[in-house]
């Protein structure tokens, strides 16, 4: 009886650990956008590049870095809660620019690929 109880506790523990670690590894759309802009601001273009969807095609890292280097001037990126529709999502983000009184609105479009959210478009408004 004691062996059965220990075995049952071990199975329950494994299931709980798998659930906790599997659930914490994937980011929701808002977290992806926050991480994307934080990476750009920090100049970590390789990490930011990883958030892009494969649907965008192969964008060489050096070209991505050149086109996104201006985003290092982000003073703050404030995201609103994501609007999610099954495998698609959009996150409205307000970017403030360092040393300027301007704010730029960007709607980030995302798509889920095997449970992982990736950026498919940035719509500036």
Image (spheres, helix red, strand yellow):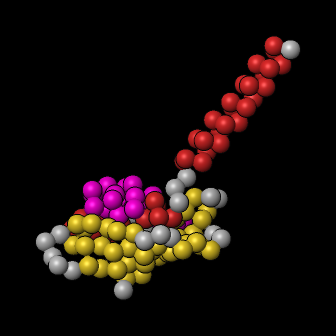
In the image, residue 83 sits, relative to residue 11, either above or below, namely below
The single residue placed furthest to the left in the displayed view is 99
Left or right relative to 85: residue 109? left
In the image, residue 79 sits, relative to residue 38, either above or below, namely below
Is residue 92 inside the magenta stretch?
Answer: no
Q: Which percent across, then down, holds residue 122? A: 42, 77
Residue 58 makes an appearance in the image? no
The single residue placed furthest to the bottom in the displayed view is 125
Residue under the image location 26 percent in, 79 percent down: 103
Residue under the image location 33 percent in, 59 percent down: 38
Q: Residue 106's quadrant in the figure? A: bottom left
Left or right relative to 99: residue 33? right
Name the image quarter holding the N terminus.
Answer: top right
Residue 1 makes an appearance in the image? yes
Q: Give the range drawn in magenta.
A: 34-54
| Magenta residues, dominant SS class | helix
Residue under the image location 55 percent in, 47 percent down: 24
Q: Residue 7's quadrant in the figure? A: top right
Left or right relative to 13: residue 108? left
Left or right relative to 64: residue 75? left
Name the image quarter holding the C terminus.
Answer: bottom left
């Amino acid at each position: 009886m004691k062996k059965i109880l220990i075995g049952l506790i071990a199975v329950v523990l494994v299931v709980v650990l798998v659930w906790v670690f599997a659930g914490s590894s994937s980011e929701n759309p808002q977290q992806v956008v926050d991480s994307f802009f934080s990476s750009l601001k920090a100049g970590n273009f390789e990490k930011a590049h990883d958030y892009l969807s494969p649907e965008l095609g192969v964008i060489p890292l050096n070209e991505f870095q050149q086109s996104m280097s201006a985003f290092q001037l982000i003073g703050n990126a404030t995201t609103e809660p994501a609007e999610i529709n099954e495998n698609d999502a959009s996150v409205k983000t307000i970017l403030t620019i360092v040393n300027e009184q301007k704010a730029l609105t960007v709607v980030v479009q995302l798509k889920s690929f095997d449970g992982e959210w990736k950026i498919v478009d940035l719509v500036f408004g």
